[in-house]
Image: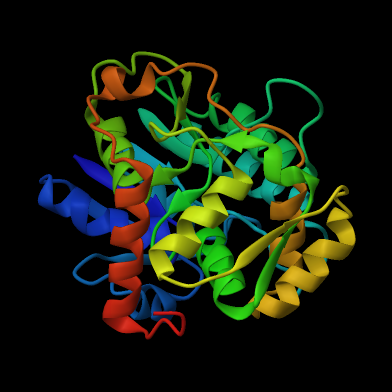
Amino acid sequence: MTVLVTGASGYVGAALVPRLQRAGMDVRAFARDPGRVAAAGVTGVPVVVGDAVSGAGLAEALDGVEVAYFLIHSMEAAAGGGGFEARDRVAAARFAAAARAAGVRRVVYLGGLVPTQGPASAHLASRLEVERTLLQAAPEALALRASIVIGARSRSFRFLVRLVERVPVMPLPSWREHRTRPIDGRDVLAFLVAGATSDAVDGPVSLDIAGPDTVTYGELITRIRDALLVGRAPIPLGFSLTPIASRVAAAIAGEDHALIGPLMEGLDGDLLPRDDRAAPTLGVRLHRLNAAIERALRDWEAVEELRAR
């Protein structure tokens, strides 16, 4: 089976490639910069150079492909201008058209959980728009929606760890009471690998993937604090002020606000799965949250010192 992985230089894509290879698949990568793919540790696969936004290279990359992974997210500012919503919309549309033209049997997309009540943030609304486009890209399209991914290279997890490391106390806005179900990065990869071959995907389908533990965002931060073995007294705040808080938090964590701002907007409500059928449907066993956090921190420490530990 020939498989294409877009976004192969990113956290999920770079980890997915060797797992697909071990599963016996013929893997091909698609990226704007092959150097970044190699720097992410991806070796032994051909890299087709192209750009999903412009459409360059897509026909070549998808030629003869049976399963294609769409792992492209545009969060930070781009040189060409325009918001991430517009770039993702164009990239998804061009990719879907190219996949249909190439006769790709299955497209697998990793997006985000969306609130079951109330409006979605701009970031999550964009992910949902991309999902709807890609579900029309192939006869057996599969969209997986995840909450916060717990992994050493996950940007959202790294952001939370850096915050806990660098503040003497933890001011927690009102969104601390909202709930979600973080998922171990190993489980995300297991879902993605299973998504390539599972007979359960017999038509366009969207599945919510989530860990077994429901926690508030405040509890998630506390669990990270405890795993880091540091004392950080939480200070509950009676307001949110997300636009201001996101800029302060991005500065403390040393992150780009263009990334952190949209992510934090998604905290203003519960992000819970619609149901729990994904794990039994695709045959994935789920890790508990504490185990996921400990594993992610160990993987992080293997290549980079954690100041708090």
> Is residue 78 among what the camera can see?
no
Q: Nearer the viewer, residue 201 or 209?
A: 209
What residue is drawn where x is 24% and y is 17%?
199
Q: Nearer the viewer, residue 107 or 306?
A: 306
Q: Position of residue 188 (x, y in %)?
A: 36, 43
Q: Nearer the viewer, residue 106 or 248?
A: 248
Q: Quadrant of the N terminus?
A: top left
Viewed as shown, does residue 205 lie left or right of 123?
left
What residue is drawn where x is 69% and y is 46%?
176
Compared to residue 93, the image places residue 116 above or below, namely above
Q: Quadrant of the C terminus?
A: bottom left
Viewed as shown, does residue 234 lie left or right of 272?
right
What residue is drawn where x is 62% and y is 49%?
218
> Is residue 254 among what the camera can see?
yes
Number of disc labels: 0
Viewed as shown, does residue 203 lie left or right of 50?
left
Q: Position of residue 126 (x, y in %)?
A: 71, 41
Viewed as shown, does residue 298 lie left or right of 175?
left
Q: Position of residue 50 (x, y in %)?
A: 51, 64
Q: Position of residue 293 (x, y in %)?
A: 37, 56
Q: Nearer the viewer, residue 304 or 102?
A: 304
Compared to residue 117, the image places residue 67 above or below, namely below
Compared to residue 21, the image places residue 198 above or below, namely above
Residue 6 image-quadrant placement:
bottom left
What residue is drawn where x is 57% and y is 36%?
180
